[in-house]
Image: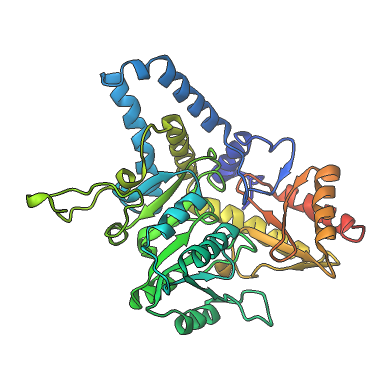
Amino acid sequence: MDSEQGGADGCLFSQLRADTPLASQYIYLNICTFGPVLRSVQRCMADALREENEEIIAIRGKEAGVRFYERAEKARQSVADLLGVSAANVAWVYNTTTASRLAIMSVDWQAGDRLAVTDVEHLSTHQAARGLAQGRGVGVTVIPTAEPHEGIYRGPSYFLEQLDQMLTPAHRLLVISHVSNIDGRRLPVMEATRLARSRGVKTLVDGAQSVGMFGVNAKEIGAEFFSGSVHKWLMGPPGIGFLVVSDEGKEDYNPFSLPLPTGAGGRPDGNLMAAGALNELGTQNYPLRIGAGACVEAAQRIGLNKIEEQCRSMTEQLRAGLRGVPGIRVASPAKWELSSSVTTVQLQDGTPERCLKLVERLLEEYRIVVKYRPENCGVRIGVAAFNTAAEIEQLLTALGHLTPQV
């Protein structure tokens, strides 16, 4: 299915495309980095900002003021519903990186403790790992997700075998991406979380590249922490993300050393505070939250199953077409169950300079927006639900023309 087909679904995606900035000017295939904020979400945020400053801040305790802040709090419930968790487990943060750092730093790290990360984590996660090693004497274990001599991810078996062999009770936390930002491989987060728990190890799942592309149930995944943002696949505003902290995770989670609920004798009574209460300090940006809720609701109106089907259809079209482009190698897994609508291609005998030149010429000559990935010297293509089959064909034509020239 694509947005050029008829029927109710085609109409939904046509409406999404009409609501998407840039869509009429560029072939935008960089949603993995930054999704254009939907025009309807921009209007919602502008209206909320205007309302807050023209009236609400003067009548905060009045009925209208209460209703405004209830709308902002409703956005938390929208995110919770999207992820299959309770609103009490959702905390607002700036972005996925901040959410992940809060989860990582909630551990009382001691010299000799170990942190486990996969080999396809975001650069910011590897930076956090290096910082812990330098500052706290924490050992870092990098778990390979694919056999070194192959490189391409062919399924969960090898990774889970390596995780089983390398993860020990000395590890305090496992960090694993749901979908890798490098090549779109989809990792077995539920199985990894289960294995980690059997060793007494907590898990943080990075959901930056999964939430909004397909349905995600963080409760079923079972990790103590699940981080994400709204500015990618959900096409919401930058500067706001979320951290899901499970009830088990909240038992030791208190990043700002807040006083906990107390009982007799002033001792903590064991009641868990909401994740938001543990995270959100001082004056908050309520219009930003309302915008986050609006983009989530827009995705839910279409349906995450329909969004996934749309993305899958065009991704399969793209990868089938790439097989006919000389000088191009697809670095992403072939099977959808192991992959996503993130496709990374590599140039045969390619260098960073060639890849960067290709990205530059795609933009300048064809108004096609993609991104260079230095981790594997590749060009990353993110197919979103607002893209069309015709745009995929234009990309394939452009690659066929430019690849021999760069």
Q: In this view, does 56 lie above or below 379?
A: above
> Which image quarter: residue 113?
bottom left
- Depth check: give the residue in front, 104 or 2: 104
Q: Is residue 58 visible?
A: yes
Of residue 220 and residue 354, the one placed in the foreground of this image is: 354
Q: Which residue lies furthest to the left in this view?
A: 264
- Which color scheme is applied? rainbow
In the rendered image of this protein, does residue 103 appear above or below residue 158? above
Q: Is residue 217 visible?
A: no
Q: Which residue is drawn at 83% across and 66% down?
A: 350
Count of numbered badges drawn on the protein: 0
Image coordinates of residue 234 in percent, x first then y, are 53, 45
Return the residue found at the far right: 405
Q: Identify the residue at horizontal 79%, vertical 42% (top origin).
A: 367
Q: Nearer the viewer, residue 203 or 335?
A: 203
Residue placed most toward the observer, 88 or 334: 88
Please state the horizontal and vertical placement of residue 279, each as a whole percent of the image. Answer: 36, 45
Does residue 70 appear to the left or right of 166 in the view shown? left
Quadrant of the image occupied by residue 183: bottom right
Q: In this view, does 216 lie above or below 363?
A: below
Q: In this view, does 145 lie to the left or right of 58?
A: right
Please provide percent x and percent y for residue 104.
43, 60
Q: In this view, does 369 lie to the left or right of 224?
A: right
- Image point (58%, 60%), residue name: 122
Q: Position of residue 80 (x, y in %)?
A: 36, 48
Quadrant of the image containing the C terminus: bottom right
